[in-house]
Image: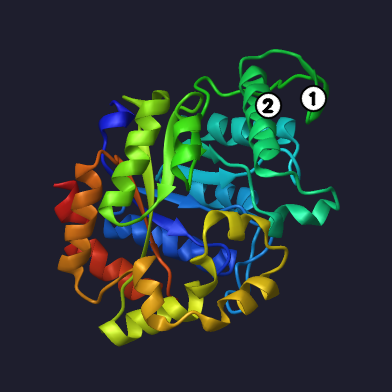
Amino acid sequence: MNENNTLRIGYHASHEQFKPSELLQYVQKAEQAGFNASMSSDHYAPWSLDQGESGFAWSWLGAAMQATKLPFGIVNAPGQRYHPAIIAQAAATLAEIFPERFWVAMGSGQYINEQITGDPWPVKQDRNNRLKECVDIIRALWDGETVTHHGLVKVEQAKLYTRAKVAPKIIGAAITEETAEWVGSWADGMITVSKPPKELKKMVEAFHRGGGEGKPMYLKVQLSYDKDEKAALQGAHDQWRSNIFPSAVLSDMRTAKQLEQAAMFVREEDLREHVRVSADPGQHLEWLQQDIDLGFSQLILHNVNLEQERFIDVFGDKVVPQLLR
């Protein structure tokens, strides 16, 4: 089976919003409902105090992958909070236990998660350079090499003794066109977040321009579905208003409290530009079909409000089977 051509509709496990034990139940329920993939974030802090959770995604992944048969991905930022040799080992272990069911997306990170080390927060260009160094180190370790490296990160005589027969894909995480073009040159694919079709098309073009032509593209779709339009909009505002700022703001804020204060003046209606708010499954179906038409082969659906069970049931009935058909 060529993974590039297999359409996957995934459930996003949001560690910032739910306890790991709850997420385990949601991901099992999503599999039963017909979702055929999953993904989780890997943060140390939530985006706001209202979200209020942040479990350790790597230990949760072992449980979730054992409890389901779904392929999983994680978005990770190696280089500061995590040493790349540790991430190489963690990913190789999951890929050995669960062959060809695990991928890792790598990005340059956000200060809100990385500041816990007490190290200075580099400017974006240095973060990108550090990320690329980490990716090269991780790939070399997966290839069985002994790695010594002295650059923006340091590695001394690291060798991975337990490796997977097939190494996980490394997907480049991109929020801006500039980053999309850059990850096209080194990543096995790209993951980005949902935007209006014109903007998303520019992301696709930038990725292709940088060398991503023919590589898989994944999309984390931020949506809010609930019993009615009002509840969907309120739920999105309650949980996701601190996430709508541009990448440069989100990546440099230090605490969840700061983000919450920055979001004080965000109105409910402002969320519509950043989250697909609708109580109509048919509208969501139409939006998702546009993403598929742009060439995305994996759509990870993140219902940003707290009503997960209703979302899984309704989308499992009225959206996922129609897309996979």
Residue 151 disc label: 1
Check disc 1 and report its element: helix, strand or loop: loop
Instruction: Identify the image quadrant of residue 252.
Output: bottom right
Position of the N terminus, as image quadrant, is top left
- At which x and y percent is residue 322? 14, 54
Q: How is the image coloured?
A: rainbow
Q: Is residue 81 above or below residue 224?
A: above
Residue tagged 2? 133
Between 194 and 27, the one lying in front of the other is: 194
What distance separates the C-alpha of mark 2 from that of mark 1? 8 Å
Residues tagged 2 and 1 counted as in contact (Cβ below 8 A): yes
- At which x and y percent is residue 105? 52, 39
Amino acid marked by disc 1:
Gly
- Residue 49 seen by the camera: no
Check disc 2 and report its element: helix, strand or loop: helix
- Residue 191 seen by the camera: yes
Q: Is residue 135 above or below residue 308?
A: above
Amino acid marked by disc 2:
Glu
Q: Residue at x 65, y 43 (%)?
A: 124
Query: Callout 2: 10 Å neighbours few (<14), some, many (20+)?
Result: many
Q: Which residue is drawn at 86% across and 53% down?
A: 118
Q: In this view, does 169 lie above or below 308?
A: above
Residue that extends furthest to the top in the rendered view of this protein? 145
Is 277 situated left or right of 270 in this image?
A: left
Instruction: Identify the image quadrant of residue 268.
Output: bottom left
Query: Callout 1: 10 Å neighbours few (<14), some, many (20+)?
Result: few
Is 6 situated left or right of 92 in this image?
A: left
Between 262 and 21, the one lying in front of the other is: 262
- At which x and y percent is residue 3? 32, 30
- At which x and y percent is residue 233? 35, 80
